[in-house]
Image (spheres, rainbow, N blue to C red):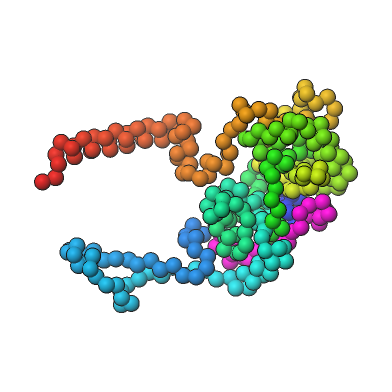
Amino acid sequence: MKKEQVVHCQFSVWYPIFKKHTIKSLILPLPQNVIDYLLDDGTLVVSGRYEITQTHTHTHKSTTRNRTWSDDETTAIATAPEFPEFTSTVLEAINALGGCVFPKLNWSAPRDANWIALNSSLECRSLSDVFLLFKSSDFITHDLTQPFLHCSDQDSPDPVISYELVLRKWAELIPGGEFRCFVKENKLIAVSQRDYTQYYQHILKQEQHISQAIQDFFSQHVQYRFLDEDFVFDVYRDSQGRVWLIDLNPFGEVTDSLLFSWDELMSGEVVDHQQQDGPAFRYTTSEVTVQPSPCLSYRIPRDFVDLSAGEDAYKLIDFLKLTKSQQEESEEEEENPPQ
């Protein structure tokens, strides 16, 4: 995967080419002060003010309990950053798209951060909704800091990127209708169920219809129209059988290969005994193979994930030592209660 391929997969590059076959969207330049704010590790506050009162240590508990706090007390006030012009532009765009949008940057959407939203959804109605998701997302941070991390031509200079906020008209997409398609040398070689962690019975029943619909969409609207010969594109097949283009991604390890491996995709020889003609088509075939969503790991500290997966022996040893120490302290307190 070359840096040029990553550049070609920016939303603002492919959207004009396939505008008729995807969801209506608006692209807004991202000001540098907004980028700096998104990369800042500080508070999540994005509008209004949040006051933090710093209490003083008192020798008498009763004084602290009965004290009335006044304006004379020393307080630390965290003032939220203000982006009046950008806020106004974003609000106009949201209203133009019906009042609800799906946000993303040049490449990624904050899919790993939906847990922090009140409704556990990526649906946004204001800039503060967007900021909350973006500042909680590792995917967004990757876009802003390491977009060319997995490229093979690391010796070449990084292309200059103009970052953009992409607002897409909100649409309720059923996860069972999403598919990821892999193209090598302008040939569709593989199709994978996008939400492979779940079993959808309709996919099993409509396998041939779904596969043919995607092949027809590719040959009629996508093939030979993109800037690269190798790429990955995501589609959605609605209840009427119509296929929509959702996203384009680089053909490489930076993109999740889902039910395939990158070794077989890179070779171009994807074996699928059930599919005689056309691309290999893989999907979850029964409830027995259902798995937890990979994005769940972003909801808890990484150390906890490593512990549960047994991927870091040193963390496990430290955890066991800490547990033993806490047990010993607890036993001492029981033996020597405070007088």
Residue at the spot 61% in from the left edge and 48% down from the top edge: 111
| Residue drawn at x 68%, y 42% as measured from the top left | 175
Left or right side of 239 for 60 = left
Residue ranking furthest to the left? 339
Camera-side residue of 193 and 188: 193
Q: Dividing the image into 4 quarters, which one contains the N terminus?
A: top right
Q: Is residue 19 covered in magenta?
A: yes
Residue sitting nearer the eye, 231 or 61:
61
For this orientation, the residue located farthest to the top is: 273
- x and y percent of residue 82 in the render? 55, 71
Q: Residue 290's image quarter? A: top right
> For this rendering, which residue is in front, 180 or 270?
180
Residue positioned 58% across, 66% down in the render: 33
Observer able to see residue 157: no
Q: Is residue 30 above or below residue 107?
A: below
Query: Which residue appears farthest toward the right when viewing the image?
Result: 220
Place of residue 199 in the rendered image (x, y in percent of width and height, measured from the top left): 66, 33
Above or below, 130 against 1 in this view is below
Q: Is residue 18 magenta?
A: yes
Residue 272 seen in render = yes
Front-most of 267 and 191?
A: 191
Left or right, 4 with respect to 58, comes to: right
Q: Is residue 293 above or below residue 31?
A: above
Q: Who's the residue at 38% across and 66% down the image?
A: 52
Q: Which residues are magenta?
A: 14-38
Q: Position of residue 2 (x, y in %)?
A: 72, 44
Report x, y in % for residue 239.
Answer: 77, 44
